Image (cartoon, rainbow, N blue to C red):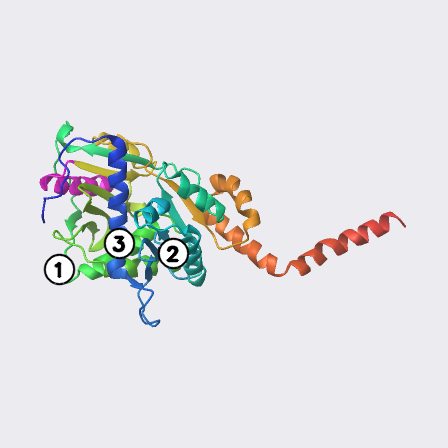
Amino acid sequence: MSTMNILTKGIELFELNELFCENKKSFYLYIANYAASDGNENEQDNKPLRFHKIENMIDCIFSPNMFWSFYNAILNTDICDTMEHYHCNDKDKIIKQILSLASDYKCPTRLQVKPSAFDTQKLLKRYGFFELPQMNDEYQYIDFYHSDNLLKYDDAKSDIKIYELDDSTQADCRLRKLEWGYVLCESFGFRNAEIHGPFYADVWSRVEVGPTKPIRMFIAVKDDRVIGGCHLTLASGIACLFNVTTLKNERGKGIGKALSLTAMVNARELNYRYMTLQASRMGAPIYKKLGFKPIPSPYKSYVKIATAAWYYKIIEMPLAMFGIQRLQRLINIIQKLSKNLLLVMMIVIIPVGILIARMFK
């Protein structure tokens, strides 16, 4: 793998945030290269994702009929800035095309926006996007050049094997990636495992990984069964660690730490100076022990759900308390009720009318 573009000089944290956003975009685009068809392909295409480059400028991925998915996303962190780069001023046309596609695919769309992208934030709010509360996740980085930690492989327990997947040399690589899709689904707590499991398994079984690929994948295997994994991406001059997952009944055994260390060692051996990640509340203390330090959140998250605009603002308060998945079920109920508004009004008004009539007898 070429090391020509690896960042070796010291930079400010805001610059590192910018590179993290670019790396993450490269991560999604690489997935789309294998698991998404574009809008011009045959309708019979059975790939799980759809990729669109709106007006040849704005990159979007959609998961048809998947109400909540990592991949329902606008990948540009500043729509207005991107459009200025291409000397395009019709922002309304761009947003309307994006929302039309989201409606066709029956899925929401989200966008992670740079905090400094004020024009893009105003544009999104005008079209009914609402800002999600900041998650408990913590963004962290490590500068290998100034780390006191001695990096070495950690094999976790003796009955657990950790190794790198490689599509070019391993006959069972696709099967292992398929297994890991189900691990991802369980680890991230998706309630509808029968829907999300096959979806994520299908996506990742298609994505090529290996030592010479932009995405490298490491898995943990016990009794010939995948129980954990992670992804290492090498783009925009930095390394990023994504999707560190372990089956719930295998947690607390050092598997996530061992997977992370394996990725860290590989990045360091390739002479990468910086590695960034987005840690969960559970994982953050572990990464701090490994030498990672916190950085400010590189973006704000906005989402547009295909539903009536009048209750967007109502959602924002309970969203922080109950979480997006529970509220999605509430949205579905409200949508069904809105289709039968007359019936609902009759159910409510008739008993009230009878009660009032009895009061005045």
Q: Secondary structure at mark 2?
A: helix
**Residues under numbered marks 3 and 1 in contact, where contact means CB atoms less than 8 Å apart:** no
The spot of residue 218 in percent (x, y) is 19, 49
Q: Is residue 143 visible?
A: yes
Q: Is residue 233 left or right of residue 342?
A: left
Q: Earlier in the sequence, mark 3 or mark 1?
A: 3
Residue 187 is labelled as: none
Q: Is residue 271 left or right of residue 220?
A: left
Crowdedness near tag 3: few (<14), some (14–19) or many (≥20) residues, C-alpha within 10 Å? some
The spot of residue 173 in percent (x, y) is 18, 59
Q: Which residue is the site of mark 3?
A: 29
**Residues under numbered marks 1 and 2 in contact, where contact means CB atoms less than 8 Å apart:** no
The spot of residue 316 in percent (x, y) is 50, 41
Q: Main secondary structure of the magenta part?
A: helix
Q: Label 3 amino acid?
A: Leu
The count of marks equals: 3
The Cα–Cα distance between marks 1 and 2, rounded to whole angstroms, is 28 Å
Question: Foreground mark, 3 or 1?
Answer: 3
Q: Which residue is the site of mark 2?
A: 193
**Of 14 and 198, the residue lying toward us:** 14
Give the residues in magenta: 253-273
Residue at horizontal 82%, vertical 49%? Answer: 356
Q: Label 2 amino acid?
A: Ala
Q: Is residue 359 left or right of residue 119?
A: right
Q: Is residue 108 visible?
A: no
Residue 170 is labelled as: 1
Q: Determine whether 81 is above or below 289 in the image.
A: below
**Of 221 and 131, the residue lying toward us:** 131
Q: Label 1 amino acid?
A: Gln
Q: Is residue 248 magenta?
A: no
